[in-house]
Image (spheres, grey):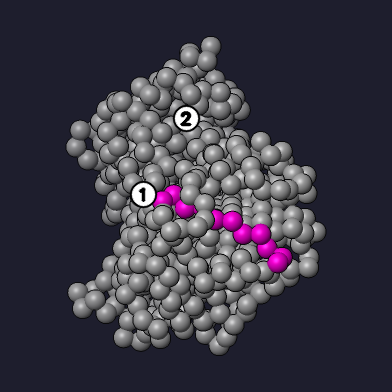
């Protein structure tokens, strides 16, 4: 059985069940209509109706700082490879962020595999939550085909009038449903309601920019020398907000962090940003993306062309975070529209 | 349920101990380091590949391997003191240990060269990875046709491997030619940019493969001269300088368009690179 129903009155019980056996993280409210993923203790802590959190769930899969290995110089150049593991349940993940996790999985599963990432990934259970309407005007999920669920979760909840429709995608999800024993069998009526909700969504969510998914890489190929990039370069402050909040940006730096005795320490991986001026610099003094326009263009091309060439999918999920967080007002959908307009 | 730290095996970031068995100063800025892996392990690299050299507490730096894989008991790297990690490496003594990851990447094509003529063009520190290929060719000399080596450097004092180059010059099966940017009046060799040497090389374009390694600024000019000589684009190979931070095709620092230099390169044919904006 791959479907189940959860009565709305029992959702709090389901969260309590999860909390009783796991660390649970879910969207919680911050000030000014913003949200973040954080640990919760009950349904009351959770915002079920939320716009994309400031940081995506990426922070659990690939933390801002994670230890790769520990070294001890008292024993020569001795080291031990490490991974920090934490069993947790991610609750209430929207389809855009599920797509983001799938992108990261592809990158770190590609050979040579990144065992540090993959080991963490195995410890995380993902429970998705469907959006029935747009979160705000920054979203571009329909253009990127991410407004409907396409896997990447153990369980997926869709809110219907009286209950939640639950798609059970993995054995791990099935075992949770069994153990919680508050779920009911799916009914024909609920399935009909789900179908109606999905068809309504197809009308509601239409490509936010007049371009088809499969035509996007070519647009970027053909507008490499466009003036749009110089305009972006003039605006951009190189702060790196856009890459920090992006669910699919995975560039990193590797640093040694010695203890105060300098004799031992850790080699760690920390987030880095292709927007930083020194990102593509080499010791000889050359910098291969010195100009801001080159760095912004590189970011966009990574989302819409380079990684498509490499991994066969677009690396923008349409979540809108980069546009929401840009201090200079660089807007992803407006940028794509400008490229379309210029190309004609 | 706090986060726990557990050890894993076979991480891509695992280092091997590299014993510095011999350190030879080459110039004021560059040292040649001979490195041995534990229990005589063979590094098993291709000419043109690189290793990540690490000093715990300071960090890692990608350094090309400058010895030939035909010499199995140890390998060599040539380190210019340029940044934090290379400065720390320069302070080490014989008997000290560095961390080694790798070899990484795609080096110079060796097998397609067999039976063909080879032109090697090195600028400055670019002689280091090419030295790996040159010594490989010397050790398998009868498998290759005519071999020409062009070397450009700032001045005679900055020339690397000068005593070894003296031996190459004496060999009848290598043609060696050098040019310096500046020199004192007593310098008997050429003065000028390396590109000026290319027109004078006597070669059969269709059976010549060219391997180029040098500072980024050099490539455009060298490629133009080679194309003028009629060398096919697919027979010109360039080793790109980028900051290979992880070596595993992930961290993004060495990315150019959809390629990662650390895994897909650092050596690429001009036929491929000419389509990649920002590569040369």
Q: Residue at x 25, y 31 (%)?
A: A327
Position of residue B266 relative to residue B275, above or below, is below
**Any part of residue B10 in sight:** no
For label 2, the crowd category at 10 Å Cα-Cα, with few meaning under 14, some 14 to 19 and many 20 or more, is many
In x, y percent, where is residue B132? 59, 66
Q: Quadrant of residue A134?
A: top left
Q: Residue at x 31, y 25 (%)?
A: A234
Query: Magenta residues, as a range?
Result: B172-182
Q: Based on the picture, tell me whether residue B190 belongs to the magenta stretch.
A: no
- As rendered, which of A257 and B214 lies closer to the eye? B214
In x, y percent, where is residue A14? 39, 52
Position of residue B254 relative to residue A241, above or below, is below
Question: Under tag 1, what secondary structure?
Answer: loop
- As rendered, which of A173 and B135 lies closer to the eye? B135
Chain ID at mark 2: A
Give the labeled residue for mark 1.
Answer: A285
Image position of B99 (left or right of B10): left
Residues at discs 1 and 2 both on one chain? yes
Give the labeled residue for mark 2.
Answer: A141
In the rendering, which numbered label is found on residue B126?
none
In x, y percent, where is residue A329? 29, 25
Position of residue A144 relative to residue B231, above or below, is above
Q: Which numbered disc flags the more N-terminal residue, 1 or 2?
A: 2
Image position of B218 (left or right of A24): right
Q: Residue at x 66, y 36 (%)?
A: B228
Position of residue B53 relative to residue A52, above or below, is below
Q: Residue at x 48, y 13 (%)?
A: A341
- For marks 1 and 2, give the CA distance: 41 Å
**Any part of residue A285 in sight:** yes
């Amino acid at each position: 059985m791959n479907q189940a129903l959860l009565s709305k009155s029992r959702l709090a019980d389901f969260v309590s069940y999860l909390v009783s056996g796991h660390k649970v993280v879910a969207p919680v409210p911050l000030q000014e209509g913003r949200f973040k993923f954080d640990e919760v203790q009950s349904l009351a802590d959770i915002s079920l109706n939320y716009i994309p959190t400031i940081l995506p769930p990426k922070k659990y899969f690939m933390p801002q700082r994670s230890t790769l290995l520990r070294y001890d110089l008292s024993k020569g150049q001795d080291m031990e490879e490490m991974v920090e593991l934490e069993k947790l349940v991610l609750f209430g993940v929207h389809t855009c962020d599920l797509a983001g996790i799938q992108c990261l999985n592809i990158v770190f599963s590609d050979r040579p595999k990144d065992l540090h990432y993959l080991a963490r990934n195995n410890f995380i259970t993902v429970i998705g939550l469907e959006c029935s309407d747009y979160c705000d005007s920054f979203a571009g999920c329909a253009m990127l085909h991410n407004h409907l669920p396409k896997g990447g979760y153990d369980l997926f909840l869709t809110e219907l009038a009286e209950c939640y429709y639950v798609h059970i995608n993995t054995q791990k999800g099935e075992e949770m449903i069994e153990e919680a024993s508050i779920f009911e069998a799916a009914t024909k009526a609920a399935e009909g309601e789900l179908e109606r909700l999905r068809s309504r969504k197809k009308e509601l969510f239409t490509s936010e920019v007049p371009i088809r998914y499969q035509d996007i890489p070519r647009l970027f190929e053909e507008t490499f020398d466009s003036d749009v990039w110089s305009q972006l370069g003039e605006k951009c402050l190189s702060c790196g907000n856009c890459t920090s909040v992006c669910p699919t940006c995975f560039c990193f730096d590797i640093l040694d962090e010695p203890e105060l005795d300098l004799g031992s320490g850790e080699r760690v991986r920390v987030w880095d940003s292709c927007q930083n001026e020194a990102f593509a610099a080499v010791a000889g003094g050359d910098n291969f993306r010195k100009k801001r326009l080159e760095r912004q263009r590189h970011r966009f091309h990574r989302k819409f062309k380079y990684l498509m060439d490499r991994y066969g999918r677009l690396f923008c999920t349409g979540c809108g975070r980069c546009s929401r967080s840009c201090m200079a007002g660089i807007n992803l959908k407006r940028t794509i529209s400008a490229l379309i307009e210029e190309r004609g | 349920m706090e986060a726990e730290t557990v050890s894993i095996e076979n991480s891509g970031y695992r280092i091997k101990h590299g014993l510095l068995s011999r350190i030879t100063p080459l110039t004021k800025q560059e040292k040649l380091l001979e490195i041995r892996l534990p229990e005589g392990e063979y590094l098993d690299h291709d000419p043109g590949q690189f290793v990540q050299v690490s000093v715990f507490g300071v960090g890692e730096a990608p350094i090309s391997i400058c010895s030939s894989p035909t010499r199995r008991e140890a390998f060599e790297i040539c380190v210019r003191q340029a940044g934090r990690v290379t400065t720390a490496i320069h302070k080490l003594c014989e008997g000290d240990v560095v961390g080694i990851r790798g070899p990484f990447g795609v080096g110079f094509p060796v097998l397609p060269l067999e039976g063909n003529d080879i032109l090697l063009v090195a600028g400055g520190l670019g002689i280091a990875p090419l030295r790996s290929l040159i010594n490989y060719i010397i050790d398998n000399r009868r498998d290759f046709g005519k071999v020409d080596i062009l070397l450009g450097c700032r001045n005679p004092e900055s020339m690397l491997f000068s005593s070894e180059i003296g031996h190459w010059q004496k060999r009848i099966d290598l043609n060696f030619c050098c040019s310096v940017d500046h020199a004192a009046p007593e310098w008997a060799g050429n003065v000028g940019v390396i590109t000026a040497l290319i027109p004078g090389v006597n070669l059969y374009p269709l059976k010549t493969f060219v391997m180029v390694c040098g500072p980024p600024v050099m490539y455009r000019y060298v490629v133009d001269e080679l194309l003028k000589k009629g060398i096919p684009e697919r027979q010109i190979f360039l080793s790109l300088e980028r900051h290979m931070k992880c070596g595993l095709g992930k961290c993004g620092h060495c990315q150019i368009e959809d390629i990662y230099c650390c895994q897909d390169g650092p050596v690429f044919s001009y036929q491929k690179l000419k389509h990649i904006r920002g590569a040369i």
